[in-house]
Image (cartoon, rainbow, N blue to C red):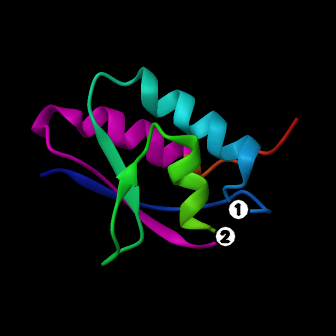
């Protein structure tokens, strides 16, 4: 099962606006991808509400995973997205 570790860069964490932007990007992927803290319960990356329920803050590390071995590129893209300021205008 492929996975990527990423750090949340957004200064206010994944609150409504950046969570929605991330969820939209994840929903466009052709793979089912989950996100969560290491050792925690993952949630669907394409769900804004579930992302917000994680309460992710700036600087926290998350794990992106997929059941599909061909999802490596999608995981890389989403990890790179978390390394940007999704809250920037």
- Residue displayed at 66% across by 70% down: 57
Q: Is residue 83 left or right of residue 74?
A: right
Q: Quadrant of residue 26?
A: top left
- Evaluate whether residue 89 shows in this view: yes
Query: Is 41 located above or below residue 35 in the figure?
Result: below
Stretch in magenta: 58-81
- Evaluate whether residue 86 shows in this view: no
Asked whether 82 or 21 is in front, the reply is 21
Residue under circle 1? 13
Q: Mark 1 to mark 2: distance in Å? A: 4 Å
Q: Position of residue 13 (x, y in %)?
A: 70, 62
- Residue displayed at 38% across by 42% down: 76
Determine the residue located farthest toward the bottom in the rendered image: 39
Magenta span has 65?
yes
Query: Is 18 located above or below residue 10 in the figure?
Result: above
Residue 57 disc label: 2
Q: Position of residue 72 (x, y in %)?
A: 24, 39
Q: Are marks 1 and 2 in contact (CB under 8 Å)?
A: yes
Q: Is residue 31 left or right of residue 80?
A: left
Total number of numbered discs in the rendering: 2
């Amino acid at each position: 099962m492929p996975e990527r570790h990423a750090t949340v860069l957004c200064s206010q964490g994944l609150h409504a606006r950046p969570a929605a932007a991330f969820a939209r990007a994840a929903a466009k992927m052709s793979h089912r991808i989950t996100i969560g803290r290491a050792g925690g319960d993952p949630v669907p990356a394409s769900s804004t509400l579930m992302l917000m329920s994680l309460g992710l803050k700036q600087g926290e590390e998350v794990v992106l995973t997929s059941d599909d071995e061909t999802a490596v590129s999608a995981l890389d893209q989403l990890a790179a997205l978390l390394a940007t300021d999704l809250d920037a205008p």
